[in-house]
Image: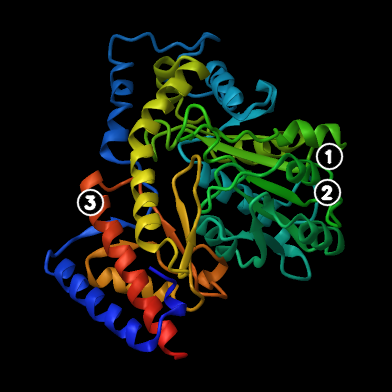
């Protein structure tokens, strides 16, 4: 079929009539499907069920340093958990600080600390004479943007290119404005595009010359080992070591967790950073807790044992996820390829597919899909303040539905894209 834009008005109206009939048939099936969040499926969660059997009432609860994990203490995390998360982060163990169950919580906490206490002795962000600003690569992660919006931080859009954020723009803004205090980054299999940062991008981050001495890169390595393929994986440079080489050791906070490795909401989270940044975080943490959940740390280490164990575990995740991603991409290729009404990413890992509709269509497509019982991520969610200037980006999350549900949801989605796009084209015919 030729592109919709090349079709006559009569051809488009005929196509619309056929599509509306198909859409009505789908509506009559009374579907109730949710593709709104990147949640692991039950099959993925089952992979970690053995972790529940690692500790019981007869288990040895003492970690390798001799500390009873049932009791208070060990603020930095037990040594074996620090080693595991350090290896996962590709940093030395001395650069790891273990937190609780969620990297999102650590990121929120880090921004809150900067607002209230400042960064490494600098003026607290909340006490500056002008509002703090953050750079936000777009499309990006809505929960990142939610944190900075919550604290009243002004967010500035930066285009996310196939190689990472537009570094010409990043360098210019960061070097010229001392009120720009941070940038959100998902460097590997970015949410939602699946793009990974190039070596050049990572090196340019490491060599940034911020006008603000308390500027920090918020480097969320959420999908660092979340590959879809064994033989075709993205590899990125490790930023903390590159910052040290560039003479900027304090420039980055790296965040990581096992949330989509073991159990979301019941994993282990950590921050990797310079010794100065970690000392700053510890001062704040000393008033928050007398130690995080060491039994959970011990449970994870005894289940995974080491990074080899984690990688083998993630291959099992990939075996579940890969067919789902390929199924969605196959439907998009078959049903929308050549129609010139959308484009989509082809990630090698992570949890999302990014779809770009014709400008002005995303909200209508999401609303149309909802009419047939399919809940998508809210249009605009991948931009700060929920405002996509082109109203075009839609995040597709294939992980949670069953294969049967995913097939139905993909059918609804492509029908919605076609119908909305035809209406948009007809406006100009």
User: Disc 1 or 3, which lies upstream in sequence?
Assistant: 1
Q: Nearer the viewer, residue 257 or 287?
A: 257
Q: Which residue is mark 2?
A: 208
Going from N to C along the chain, the mark reached first, 2 or 3, is 2
Q: Quadrant of the C terminus?
A: bottom left
Q: Which callout, 2 or 3, points to the residue nearer the camera?
A: 3
Q: Secondary structure at mark 1?
A: loop
Q: Residue at x 38, y 57 (%)?
A: 332
- At x 54%, y 34%, the residue is 99
Q: Secondary structure at mark 3?
A: helix
What whole-number distance in Å separates the C-alpha atoms at marks 2 and 1? 8 Å
Residue 204 location in percent, x, y? 80, 46
**Quadrant in which the N terminus is drawn:** bottom left
Nearest to the eye among marks 2 and 1: give it: 2
Using the image, determine if residue 109 lies above or below residue 419: above
- Residues tagged 2 and 1 counted as in contact (Cβ below 8 A): yes
Q: Quadrant of residue 188?
A: top right
Compute the Cα span from label 1 to label 3.
48 Å
Residue 315: give x, y in percent of width and height: 41, 26
User: Could you tell which of marks 2 and 1 lies nearer the N-terminus?
Assistant: 2
Mark 3 sits on what residue?
405
* 108 versus 300 height, above or below: below
Residue drawn at point x = 69 percent, y = 60 percent: 135
Query: Mark 1 — residue?
Result: 248
């Amino acid at each position: 079929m030729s592109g919709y834009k090349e079709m006559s008005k009569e051809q488009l109206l005929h196509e619309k009539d056929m599509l509306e009939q198909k859409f009505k048939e789908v509506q009559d099936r009374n579907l109730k499907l949710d593709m709104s969040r990147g949640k692991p499926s039950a099959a993925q969660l089952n992979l970690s069920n053995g972790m529940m059997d690692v500790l019981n009432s007869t288990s040895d609860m003492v970690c390798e340093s001799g500390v009873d994990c049932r009791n208070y203490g060990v603020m930095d995390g037990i040594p074996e958990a620090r080693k595991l998360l350090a290896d996962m982060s590709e940093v030395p163990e001395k650069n790891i600080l273990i937190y609780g169950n969620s990297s999102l919580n650590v990121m929120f906490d880090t921004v809150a600390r900067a607002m209230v206490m400042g960064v490494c002795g600098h003026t607290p962000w909340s006490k500056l004479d002008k509002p703090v600003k953050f750079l936000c690569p777009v499309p990006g992660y809505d929960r990142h943007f939610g944190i900075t919006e919550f604290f009243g931080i002004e967010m500035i859009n930066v285009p996310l290119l196939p190689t990472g954020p537009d570094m010409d723009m990043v360098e210019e803004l960061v070097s010229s404005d001392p009120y720009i205090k941070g940038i959100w980054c998902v460097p590997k299999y970015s949410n939602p595009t699946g793009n990974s940062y190039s070596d050049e991008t990572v090196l340019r981050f490491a060599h940034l010359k911020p006008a603000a001495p308390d500027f920090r890169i918020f480097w969320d390595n959420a999908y660092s080992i979340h590959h879809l393929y064994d033989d075709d994986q993205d590899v990125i440079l490790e930023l903390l070591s590159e910052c040290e080489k560039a003479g900027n050791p304090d420039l980055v906070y790296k965040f990581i967790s096992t949330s989509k490795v073991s159990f979301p909401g019941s994993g282990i989270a950590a921050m990797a950073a310079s010794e100065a940044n970690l000392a700053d975080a510890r001062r704040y943490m000393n008033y928050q807790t007398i130690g995080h959940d060491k039994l959970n740390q011990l449970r994870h280490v005894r289940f995974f044992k080491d990074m080899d164990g984690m990688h083998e575990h993630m291959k099992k995740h990939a075996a579940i996820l890969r067919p789902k991603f390929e199924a969605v991409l196959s439907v998009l290729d078959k049903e929308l390829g050549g129609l010139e009404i959308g484009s989509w990413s082809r990630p090698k890992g992570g949890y999302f597919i990014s779809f770009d509709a014709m400008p002005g269509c995303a909200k209508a497509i999401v609303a149309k899909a909802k009419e047939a019982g399919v809940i998508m991520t809210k249009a605009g969610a991948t931009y700060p303040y929920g405002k996509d200037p082109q109203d075009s980006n839609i995040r597709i999350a294939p992980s949670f539905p069953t294969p049967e549900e995913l097939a139905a949801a993909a059918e609804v989605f492509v029908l919605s894209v076609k119908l909305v796009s035809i209406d948009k084209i007809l406006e100009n015919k």
